[in-house]
Image: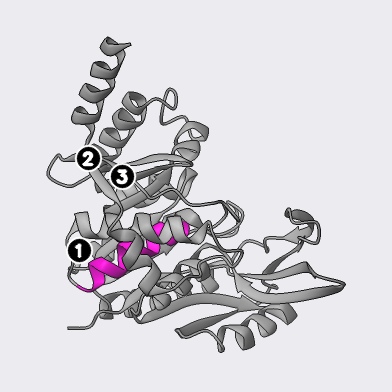
């Protein structure tokens, strides 16, 4: 059985970061963006990855060389315009943005070519991740709807980690697992507030619209997992010291996809996803980690029915 994951990352970024190490300033160049970070974590978990991207200009040429050093299979489509980038300064320990350019919108023939390559690789893989660009106008959301529809209709398992118009598009197409943060649900007007009840209601609506299972991350609070079949769980990740909050959600999505590609069930996928996300916050490198650490942390992830936790909270309130 092919355990490969196809990751659709239409507009990867060149990331340039300044770091301070003792008396020396270090410059780090890496390929980045949501799909690249997801692919990196999937690879760390031992699952092969095919990354489908569009690259262009001088930045795209640099990205092509850097991606060749990643342990992934890259299918790249040439763009007329340059790829996006950002420059961040972490010399004082916190991250500040110096400048960025997410890239210009892709034109029709580039989208057509990228769609064909992505569909081909997605049909070859049991699981596909649809990841978003850095800015909402770089890629037409309809390509996400079409990919979700076509891959699902041909037996593929589609996992998506998106927001805004991209989220609406994949839900319309139909996805097996939709990962979304509670902040994105609030920003998109899909949840009334950040209470468990409101977030569950939003998740149920997304299920009715086309997402079989919904995983809602909640920053430092337990995530919510609304699984296909009606089971609703709180996901308690082990507590770890925070070094970098960025990338935790992408690592969670990567963990879920990696397990599903190996034929694992949804609850195992949620455990590994939660563990991968928890590990990522302890590291400065986005989408990085070790499989042995993820497996160890997964043993400490607790899944509890939402209604049981609510009863426990009520009991505690009565004692007080």
User: Is the residue marked by circle 1 packed among few (<14), some (14-19), or many (20+) residues within 10 Å?
Assistant: few
Q: What element carries label 2?
A: strand
* Residue 122 relative to residue 96: left or right: left
**Quadrant for the C terminus in the image:** top left
Residue 279, percent across and down? 46, 60
User: Is the residue marked by circle 3 packed among few (<14), some (14-19), or many (20+) residues within 10 Å?
Assistant: many
Q: Is residue 58 above or below residue 266?
A: below
Gap in Å between the C-alphas at discs 2 and 1? 33 Å
Image disc number at residue 153: 1
As for residue 299 lying within the magenta part, the answer is: no
Magenta residues span 250-262
Q: Quadrant of residue 319?
A: top left
Q: Do the residues labelled 2 and 1 touch (CB within 8 Å)?
A: no
Q: Is the magenta stretch mostly helix, strand or loop?
A: helix
Q: What element carries label 3?
A: strand
Q: Is residue 275 above or below residue 292?
A: above
Q: Is residue 285 above or below residue 70?
A: above
Closest to the observer, 318 or 301: 318
Image disc number at residue 202: none
Q: Mark 2 points at which residue?
A: 304
Mark with earlier residue (3, 2): 3
Q: Mark 3 points at which residue?
A: 235
Residue 241, percent across and down? 54, 51
Mark with earlier residue (3, 1): 1
Closest to the observer, 9 or 239: 239
What is the total number of numbered labels drawn onto the structure image?
A: 3
């Amino acid at each position: 059985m092919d355990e490969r994951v196809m990751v659709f990352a239409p507009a990867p970024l060149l990331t340039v970061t300044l770091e301070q190490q003792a008396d020396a300033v270090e410059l780090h160049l890496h390929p980045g963006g949501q799909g690249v970070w997801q692919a990196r974590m999937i690879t760390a978990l031992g699952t092969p990855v095919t990354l489908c991207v569009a690259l262009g200009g001088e930045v795209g040429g640099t990205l092509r060389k850097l991606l060749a050093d990643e342990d992934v299979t890259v299918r790249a489509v040439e763009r007329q315009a340059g790829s996006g980038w950002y420059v961040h300064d972490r010399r004082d320990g916190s991250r500040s943005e110096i400048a960025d350019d997410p890239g210009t919108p892709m034109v029709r023939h580039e989208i057509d070519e990228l769609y064909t390559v992505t569909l081909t690789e997605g049909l070859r893989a049991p699981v596909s991740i649809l990841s978003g660009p850095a800015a909402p106008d770089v890629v037409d959301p309809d390509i996400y709807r079409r990919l979700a529809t076509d891959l699902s209709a041909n037996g593929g398992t589609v996992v998506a980690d998106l927001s805004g118009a991209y989220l609406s598009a994949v839900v319309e197409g139909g996805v097996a697992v939709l990962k979304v943060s509670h902040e994105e649900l609030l920003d998109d007007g899909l949840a009334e507030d950040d209470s468990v009840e409101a977030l569950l209601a939003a998740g149920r609506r997304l299920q009715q619209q086309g997402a079989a299972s919904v995983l809602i991350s909640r920053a430092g609070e337990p995530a919510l997992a609304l699984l296909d079949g009606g089971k609703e769980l709180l996901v308690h990740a082990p507590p770890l010291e925070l070094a970098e909050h960025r990338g935790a959600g992408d690592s969670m999505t990567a963990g879920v996809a990696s397990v599903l590609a190996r034929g694992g069930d949804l609850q195992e996928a949620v455990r590994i996803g939660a563990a991968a996300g928890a590990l990522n916050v302890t590291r400065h490198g986005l989408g990085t980690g070790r499989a042995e650490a993820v497996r160890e942390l997964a043993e400490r992830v607790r899944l509890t029915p939402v209604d049981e936790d609510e009863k426990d909270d009520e009991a505690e309130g009565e004692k007080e």
